[in-house]
């Protein structure tokens, strides 16, 4: 139980962050006919931070032995990635960004998020697999987090310069 205390903290932190920012992003999307570039940078930043918190949670789950805690980590990770994956198309068509900027490796970011979601589903079914795939999975999510952080910074700089 004691080895899980920090992980429980990280679970609560991520859950609160995603719930709070999901509401803010949804309100932003509903309140405007067109998303401004500044709003796009803000939303990409929220995506990036959510995924960064997810990577921290996954990294620390390597020390967890409780199956239900590992399942909770997987479910929360899944909800976070799904939120981003299903929100992104609403933003993508609204902000001035080139399609090339939405490519991670050799695939569109939506495809990368979909792959993450499929991977996480396996962890929900078999939580102990999260411990053995931890580093690879951590790296995948971290890469997507940095992708959104880079987009946010790039768009933010464009807003300042214009």
Image: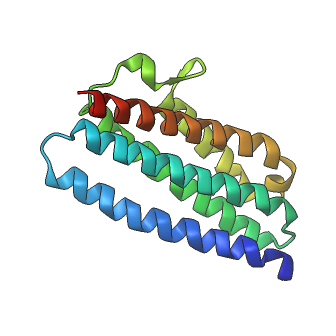
> Which residue does the image show at 23% across and 27% down from the upper left?
162
**Depth order, front residue of 32/123:** 32
**44 vs 80: above or below:** above
**50 vs 20: above or below:** above
Quadrant for the N terminus, please.
Answer: bottom right
**65 vs 33: above or below:** below
> Which residue does the image show at 19% across and 54% down from the upper left?
30
**45 vs 18: above or below:** above
Q: On the picture, is 48 further left or further right than 9?
A: left
Q: On the picture, is 32 further left or further right than 151?
A: left
- Tally of numbered tags: 0
> Which residue does the image show at 65% across and 69% down from the upper left?
10
**Depth order, front residue of 124/72:** 72
**Depth order, front residue of 72/104:** 104
Residue 110 % position (x, y): 47, 33
Residue 127 % position (x, y): 77, 60
Residue 124 appearing in the image: no
Residue 76 appearing in the image: yes
Corner quadrant of residue 68 = bottom right
Q: Residue furthest bottom?
A: 1
**Depth order, front residue of 148/115:** 148
Structure colour scheme: rainbow
Q: On the picture, is 27 further left or further right than 75?
A: left
Q: Residue furthest front?
A: 161
> Which residue does the image show at 35% across and 47% down from the upper left?
42
Residue 140 % position (x, y): 68, 38
Corner quadrant of residue 73 = bottom right
Residue 67 % position (x, y): 80, 70
């Amino acid at each position: 139980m004691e080895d899980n205390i920090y992980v429980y903290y990280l679970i609560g932190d991520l859950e609160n962050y995603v719930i709070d920012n999901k509401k803010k992003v949804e309100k932003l999307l509903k309140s405007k006919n067109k998303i401004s570039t500044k709003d796009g940078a803000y939303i990409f930043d929220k995506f990036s931070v959510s995924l960064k918190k997810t990577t921290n949670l996954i990294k620390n789950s390597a020390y967890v032995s409780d199956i239900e805690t590992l399942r909770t980590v997987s479910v929360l990770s899944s909800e976070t990635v799904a939120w981003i994956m299903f929100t992104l198309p609403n933003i993508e068509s609204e902000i001035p960004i080139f399609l090339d900027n939405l490519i991670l490796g050799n695939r569109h970011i939506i495809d990368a998020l979909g792959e993450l979601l499929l991977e996480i589903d396996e962890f929900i079914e078999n939580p102990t697999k999260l411990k053995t795939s931890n580093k690879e999975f951590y790296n995948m999510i971290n890469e997507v987090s940095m992708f959104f952080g880079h987009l946010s910074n790039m768009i933010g700089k464009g807003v300042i310069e214009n």
